[in-house]
Image: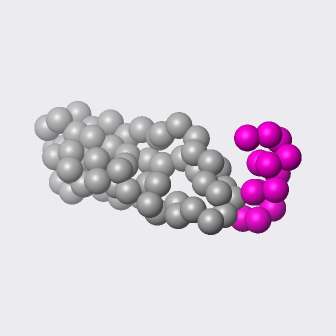
Amino acid sequence: MSPQEVSFELNRGGKFVVYRYCFSALVITVMQGTDIYFVRADESRVRKGLPWTFLTLLVGWWGIPWVPCARCIR
């Protein structure tokens, strides 16, 4: 996208977002942020974040003593 197109989308309500996710392996819990995503005004931020939500739900709550992973919910 050109800088003018990005500016146009930002004026329409586009956003730059970073999704957080976590994964755990018993006593180790790691919380990370994704790369920066550009979400256009007509796109859903929730839909783009669903893979990270599912990852956290699948492998993020196994950590001890954070069952469920309270650090991931914040």
**Residue 51 horizontal/vertical position (percent):** 35, 50
Residue at point 53%, 64% (across, down): 44
73, 37: nearer the viewer = 37
Q: Position of residue 30 (x, y in %)?
A: 32, 36
Bounds of the magenta segment: 1-13
Q: Is residue 38 left or right of residue 56?
A: right
Res. 65 in view: no
Q: Main secondary structure of the magenta part?
A: helix
Residue 2 lies left or right of residue 69; in this view the side is right
- Residue sitting at 77 percent across and 48 percent down? 6
Quadrant of the drawing holding the C terminus:
bottom left
Is residue 5 part of the magenta span, yes or no?
A: yes
Give x and y (percent) for residue 34.
48, 40
Q: Colour scheme used in the picture?
A: one colour
Q: Residue at x 20, y 50 (%)?
A: 58
Residue at 46% x, 54% y: name it: 48
Tell me if residue 10 comes above or below residue 21 in the rendering.
Answer: below
Quadrant of the drawing holding the N terminus:
top right
| Residue 30 makes an appearance in the image | yes
Q: Is residue 3 above or below residue 43?
A: above
Name the image quarter holding residue 8.
bottom right
Question: Is 49 contained in the magenta span?
Answer: no
